[in-house]
Image (spheres, coloured by chain):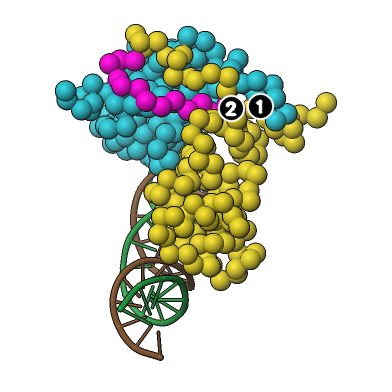
Chain colours: A yellow, B cyan, C brown, D green
Amino acid sequence: MSDLVTRLRRHQWRMTPQRRVIAETLEGAHVHYTAEEILDRACERMPEISRATVYNTLNEMVALGEVVELNFDGRSKRYDPNVDHDHHHLICDGCGVTKDVHTVADPLEWLPGDERHGFTVTEASITFRGLCPECAPAR
Amino acid sequence: MSDLVTRLRRHQWRMTPQRRVIAETLEGAHVHYTAEEILDRACERMPEISRATVYNTLNEMVALGEVVELNFDGRSKRYDPNVDHDHHHLICDGCGVTKDVHTVADPLEWLPGDERHGFTVTEASITFRGLCPECAPAR
DNA sequence: TCTTTCCTTAGACAGAGTCTAAGCTAGGAT
DNA sequence: ATCCTAGCTTAGACTCTGTCTAAGGAAAGA
């Protein structure tokens, strides 16, 4: 049983076969898939599932706070089932693969008061970029 | 004379009236415009300018390293003529206004080796979020 | 089993950005 | 000053992501 499915049930969310397949696809991912990638993988288990359902379901999971929506490249959004809010992301500029990472300190501490422009600053997220082992030039 | 135009000339970049209008529009902005906003403003000075030229020109400025592409909302990209490459961004969750900010240290140093997953990590950008003085609840 | 409400579906639509092919022009060569 | 050519600009078609619509289907309580 998927842990994300368990969390979603607590919201009195009607559990349909389509939603279960999407949740399990997300949960099993070691990378952060785009909506189209989730659709492809869901289709392997349920060929008749529709694009609209995948998009609707992902948006509902985000609204319930059980999935985080990521947007790095300006093209397609990616979905992160990790609810842990103090992690950041490492992206490959070659293939776009995205990993969760943790820093040694809270980035909020790195923004001095005189750089805050009077804002109440509540959140800081870091996007690290580089090349993954597969995309790095062979040596 | 726009400072961005001066910088672009150094790249042996053919200077056309269209490119000049786009560069001057970007340079004069106190906010970070989207491509469509730049097109609208460029059209006020040069009504026959085309969408393709605006998009091509912005992409070339980014490739030359003289403009930074930002992508916060997952809808449209925004363009920042600030050449200072070690700045980050502070965004108001209320009204969306974006400020350039500087941190006290390089965030790359805060990602330990065992969190790098074999990547060659070259860049780190931080997005700070909060409420600006106008959007913060009155007390 | 019935009923109601909500979910799913195919396909049309929308917004952002890219591509194409034809004509035009900046800037060096003459 | 004029010519040439590489490279720029243009309109509009196209792609890619994502949303909406209207009709039929199914979960879950009565």
Q: For residue A122: magenta? A: yes
Q: Mark 1 and mark 2 in contact (Cβ < 8 Å)?
A: yes
Q: Are marks 2 and 1 on the same chain?
A: no
Per the model, the C-alpha gap separating discs 2 and 1 is 7 Å
Q: Secondary structure at mark 2?
A: loop
Give amino acid for label 2: His
| Residue under numbered circle 2 | A102
Image quadrant of residue A32?
Answer: top right
The crowding category of the residue bearing disc 2, from other C-alpha atoms within 10 Å (few below 14, some 14 to 19, many at least 20), is some
Residue A100 position in % (x across, y down)? 59, 34
Label 1 element class: helix
Tell me the crowding category of disc 1: few under 14, some 14 to 19, or many 20 or more residues within 10 angstroms, Cα based: some
Can the viewer see residue B38? no
Q: Is residue A68 above or below residue A126?
A: below
Residue B31 percent location from the top left of the image: 31, 24
At x 49%, y 20%, the residue is A106
The relative height of residue B1 versus residue B26 in the rendered view (above or below) is above
Which residue lies under the disc numbered 1? B115
Q: Which residues are magenta?
A: A116-129
Residue drawn at x 47%, y 9% as measured from the top left: B104
Q: Relative to the observer, which residue lies in front, A63 or C30?
A: A63
Q: Amino acid at mark 1?
A: Glu
Q: Residue at x 55, y 58 (%)?
A: A22
Q: Nearer the viewer, residue B124 or B31?
A: B124
Q: Is residue A19 visible?
A: yes
Q: Is residue B135 left or right of residue B11?
A: left
Residue depicted at 32% across the width and 38% down the height = B48
Question: In which quadrant of the rendered view does residue D22 lie?
Answer: bottom left
